[in-house]
Image (tube, helix red, strand yellow):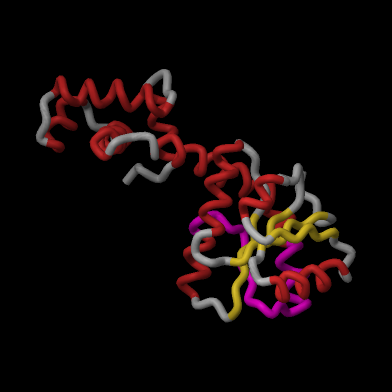
Amino acid sequence: MFSLNFLALIDGDTLRRAAISHALSSRGIHVEPFESIAELIDHWPRSGLILAYDDGRAIPALIEHMGGRGDWLPVIGFAAHPNPKRIVDAILAGAVDYLAWPFDDAELAETLKTASERADGAGNVKLREARARSRVDRLTRREREVLSCVANGLSSRMIGEKLAISHRTVEIHRANMLTKIGAHHTSEAIRVAIEASLVE
């Protein structure tokens, strides 16, 4: 369960990390500051929220790590004067919200409240998506194409025609794909494809 009483702060900038820690502590929030994702992973919290400086790599790396763990904590990204594309990229990667540094007190309070409300629902969706993408990443390009075709309702014959390969080759790729993603049947593979956003 999400708790507003604990916040893991990831920021490589020492002065900014100290300023944010002080600002949040004054609100009664217990802040654990970390210099990097690797440091946080070594001391992974059981609950709470992650406030991560967005360098373009941190948020996708956090979501991927949580997908591998099967454990979700809501992530809020932040940066100094972020441009709209940077914010969109972070939200698409899995952040539940985004802040511009320096934080406005009212905006910070609202963002923390919103993250609390979204934590469970968004977490389940993002965790399933991260797990599915992790499974799909094991596939070769051709196996991924076959999975996408299967999820879009194509038969083996139709897949063969679309990809210009034989029916037998489709079956081999299909069997390999099922094994690699750990799916026991086609319906499970389709669910993974949907969660990984492979369905057109």
Magenta span has 6?
no
Asked whether residue 110 is drawn in magenta, I would say yes
Residue drawn at the location 61% of the way across and 36% of the way down:
70
In the picture, measured across the screen, residue 123 lies left or right of residue 163, that is right
Please tell me which residue is depicted at 61% across the width and 58% down the height of the picture.
96
Q: Is residue 59 above or below residue 189?
A: below
Percent x, y for residue 200? 32, 46
- The residue depicted at 44 percent of the width and 24 percent of the height is 182
Task: Write down the region rendered in magenta.
Answer: 92-113
Residue 133: image quadrant is top left
Total marks shown come to 0
Identify the residue at horizontal 22%, vertical 27% (top origin).
155
Residue 47 position within the rendered picture, expressed as x and y whole percent measured from the top left: 76, 46
Looking at the picture, does residue 101 appear above or below residue 44? below
Q: Is residue 193 left or right of residue 78?
A: left
Residue 134 higher or lower than 39, as above or below: above
Position of residue 148 measured from the top left corner of the image (x, y, whole percent): 30, 38
- Residue 120 at what x, y percent from top left? 68, 46
> Could you say which is closer to the camera, residue 171 or residue 26?
26
User: Is residue 172 left or right of 57 when viewed as pictured?
Assistant: left
Give the position of the N terminus as an image quadrant. top right
Residue 15 placement: quadrant: bottom right
